[in-house]
Image: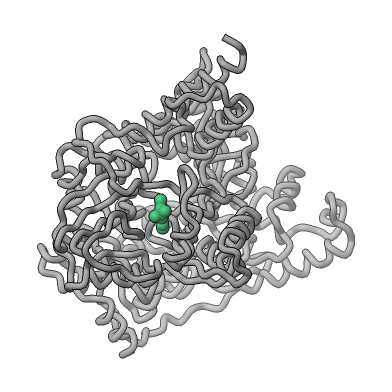
Amino acid sequence: MTTINKKIAALRAELEDHNYRYYVLDAPTIPDPEYDRLFRQLQELEQQHPELVTPASPTQRIGARPATGFKQIRHEVPMLSLANAFADEELIAFDKRVHDRLHSGAQVEYACEPKLDGLAVTLLYEQGKFVRAATRGDGTTGEDISANIRTINSVPLQLRGKDFPALLEVRGEVFMPKAGFAELNAYARKHQEKEFANPRNAAAGSLRQLDPKITASRPLEIFFYAVGKVADGDIPTTHYQLLQKFRQWGLRTCPHIQLAKGVDACLQFYHHIAEQRAELPYEIDGVVYKVNDFNLQHKLGFVSRAPRWAIAHKFPAQEEISKVDAIEFQVGRTGALTPVARLEPVFVGGVTVSNATLHNMDEIERKDVRVGDTVIVRRAGDVIPEVVSVVLAKRPKHTRKVKMPSKCPVCDSDVIKPEGEAVARCSGGLYCMAQRKESIKHFAARKAMDVDGLGDKLVEQLVDLELLHNVSDIYALTHEQIANLERMGAKSAANLLTAIDSSKSTSLARFIFALGIREVGEATANNLAEHYGNLDKLMQADEGSLQQVGDVGPVVAANVVAFFQQAHNQEVMAALIKHGVHWPDVTPQPKAALPLQGQSFVLTGTLETLTRDQAKAQLQALGAKVSSSVSAKTSYVIAGADPGSKYQKAEKLNVPIKDEAWLLALLKQH
Ligand code: 5U1
């Protein structure tokens, strides 16, 4: 065989293997962009050597072979895929092609919709009755998943109204909302079962269960976005109107669909949805634009795998492949050791990533990440990049499991991991340079003592030069010491000294927060300040008294007592006060009772007018507690569209269930 022949054969075998893992096992071992790259490589080679193209090549079919175990169904109208655009220019070129083909100068109207990361399905209705459902499969033949689709509560078994065609095939995407996916994986982790890599695989895996009872237990949802075969009846003349009809017939559609005139409006939609992406209750991987007018769609037609009237505009990939160069342990403010993977730099989620968190040892063990491994790295939104999983097939020989160091990598103190806790800690306390640096950074931070200009780099220099041993040393710094530091001079030294001086005047709540007591965040610090009014009372409080304070449970109470008992901490606080750090005592205010004080709410399902965060914030502002799980103590459950298991739990516990309109009226009333 020639080298080219061999290369093509190897790529085909590799792609087939990935197809099998993705479509049949629902357990891909590489992220989509890596698959796309391999696919494009093969396409390019085949374009250069058309004589080597065979019908069995992965480039010659729309999707993968259907899995066995289900009856096969042939799609009378093929289920096609969409062409992709990754850059704005590609969308502009698509719009130009549409104009050219239509011989039209006028702006084209597009329907813009989020592109759900789920599984495409087709459902057949006869006389409005659900008859059967199938997966897309290879686009021509799919699998009969009727029994499983029936278990999705939002799929109507009978269409509403009367004006639907006697034969109507509707197409859409089955997906698993992010919250349901997280719950499913948490359950799997707890029961030591295999977790799903992402909501898409979870949806696919759930739908392709031979036992529909399993599917029924999974939180699946569906949005419809197209028709297949239609007979004996009419549908509207535009895509947007069709979707409105779908809603009238009881078929769910995505609530974020908009019309856009011209390509600029499409791009605006794209950027708007990209901003909302993290808040959306389901995963999307881009947006889809479709020429709105069916007549124009018809004129444009199709090319091989995809329609000419639609395109998917993808977001930058959130998962990519990289290699682990090293695994190091970072020491945090409380001594917690966090393993971090040092990676070969990779562009993912819109930025170049070279470090990814591995969270803790339990996580390393579960994922079995080793130096030299090829790994899937994920960066979604502003979240810290993380290693999702290892591509075991690419593991080199002679790798070793990672061990937690027995000594702190910074100060060589013993590392302690209490039984049953996931986190291991350095026992060096403020002797450890890393803990010292982090505790001083925390003390100086904006939400704590707010020492303007005392940033991370400066703190690191000052600790390294042994000018700061603890937080009270900040107030003993001299002009000369600061002015001699790297990138500092007389002027910036004077500014910093002024900022240090003005930070002395603070509030009790800030001071408590700045101390960095384990698990005492801003809100708890506020509660403690309000409850005790002054530092002496807080220092003398015992665990029983502390637990009377809002937010404070046994763990936080024990942390507070332990902190104030330590002689070292008492000395530092005394030194701070001696340097002139001061605050007014807080007179505990009898709080004006808020209207929803004492009531607790649980939100479930998708709200239409408010996001969940907005609803939560507004309820909390009125004094209500918003909790994530239903108990007999819950005052009300607010249920939006497609509520989750919380709905059933509320019914079981006889907790009143209210809708969004009720919530809006309640909020308006106050
Ligand atoms: N939102 C949306 N996703 N999606 C996927 N619309 C849409 N349309 C598709 C596909 C495959 O195909 C059309 C060509 C019907």
* Residue 664 vertical position relative to residue 344 in the rendered view, above or below: below
Image color mode: one colour
Q: Nearer the viewer, residue 175 or 587?
A: 175
Give the side of residue 276 with respect to residue 352, left or right.
Answer: left
> Does residue 561 appear in the picture of this structure?
no
- Residue at 37% x, 29% y: name it: 20
x and y, in percent, of residue 382 in the image = 54, 55
Say how many tags the image has.
0
Q: Relative to 276, is 69 above or below?
A: above
Is 660 in front, or is 15?
15
- Residue extending farthest top: 1
Which image quarter: residue 265?
A: bottom right
x, y percentage for residue 310? 48, 56
Residue 76 left/right relative to 526: left
In the rendered image, is residue 159 in sight?
yes
Q: Quadrant of the C terminus?
A: bottom left
Q: Quarter containing ligand 1? A: bottom left
Q: Residue 653: percent from the left, percent from the top?
A: 11, 64
Residue at 41% across, 25% down: 17
Q: Nearer the viewer, residue 321 or 328?
A: 321
Report the quarter where the N terminus lies: top right
Image height of 554 relative to 361, above or below: below
Residue occupying image coordinates x 89% and y 61%: 490
**Residue in the picture at 16% in, 58% down:** 126
Residue 621 x %, y %: 39, 79
Q: Residue furthest bottom?
A: 669
Answer left or right for 97 relative to 289: right
